[in-house]
Image: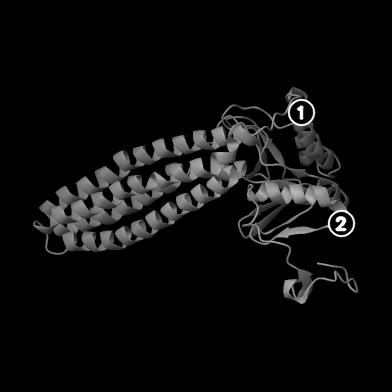
Amino acid sequence: MPDPDVSLDAPSDLRATVDGRPAVLLFGLTDPKIEERQFVRDLASLAGDRLEVRDHRLNAMLLSEDARQRRNGGKTLPAFPPGAQGVRTRRWLNRRRFLLFVGWYLFAVVPALLLTGYTAQLHELLGAAVAILGLLAVLAAYAQFVTLFSHATDLVDTEVTIAGTELVRVIGDHTDRADMHGGTVVVLPSGAKRGYGKAWLLGFPHAVALLGDPRTGRLRHHDDLHALSAVLHQSPHATDRAAARNIDSLAAQSQVSDPTQPDGADNSRLWMSLTKAGRILAWAVVVGSVLLTGGWMLESTHYLGGAVILIGVPLATWWALYALYRVLAVLGEAWQTARNNH
């Protein structure tokens, strides 16, 4: 968007509006044949102060590094681990989540369905009570175990920006701000928090940033760590300053080299989409088990078997929509990868 009273002398058919102000639409992000975030970073870096790059779909103001530092008095810490290492870490986290899913199905879903079926043969009300308790146990087990590595996966994909004394993260449509001078900052050592593997974590006190790789324990680049500790050292709270000293000790152990070459990471989005599409089969087994249990109980119960099948119908509908979403995501990534490779 141009400054007030500045004309870009653009043809009228190119004019657009951003936040109600006149603007010029240069191109859409579907046009470049490179990865979306990387394109925006490159454009912002080349343009410097002359151009402010705003990506509404990423819900972020993406500026050049120099412009960020002048605006925020800090810097943006890139998603970690970088490049191919980040791809391998996401695969590692997804494999563990899949193993937890299998365990949840075998030790929570299957016993709950079998116990419901057998008790329903003894007495239908007893079977209904067991079904309700089993459903609660299955949901609780899923929330406790299957989602164990979900937050770590989110942190792998998230950049954090030092804005004054705040640490800012953009997650979907939500912007999260954590005060680094609030007296709540802690550095959590490897293994201190379940679901984060070998990673050191920066917490408030909940984990908001990875200081190390969950898969290997490899620490962030020492420049990133020093940028965090520099802000924390200025805090009036002893807790924050203690966290700064812990980060300084980690920076001394950090590897000087920070290889960020993709090494095949360009196709990582397609690979991850294919991996997530495999969840279609896993959830098909769960939904099918519920429907089979309902059919098994139809002959021995008056109402419970039909009730279980009625529960299975919306589950099957949800599964069909989920499968469609995953298939379309894979096709979209395949198309984008094909364009990038040509």
* Residue at point 72%, 45% (across, down): 184
Task: Report which residue position mark 1 lands on.
Answer: 251
* Image spot of residue 47 (x, y percent): 83, 52
- Which of the 4 image quarters holds residue 177? bottom right
**Residue bearing the label numbered 2:** 50
What is the crowding at mark 2: few (fewer than 14 residues within 10 Å), some, or many (at least 20)?
few
Residue type at mark 1 is Ala
* Residue 18 can be seen, yes or no: no
Residue 121 vs residue 189: left or right?
left
The one nearer the camera, 157 or 25, is 25
Quarter of the image that includes the C terminus: top right
The front one of 92 and 198 is: 92
In three-dimensional space, the C-alpha distance between marks 1 and 2, rounded to whole angstroms, equals: 34 Å
SS category of the residue bearing label 2 = helix
User: Residue 21, labelled with which disc?
Assistant: none
Instruction: Say if 56 sits above or below 192 in the image.
Output: below
Specify which label sits upstream in the sequence, 1 or 2.
2
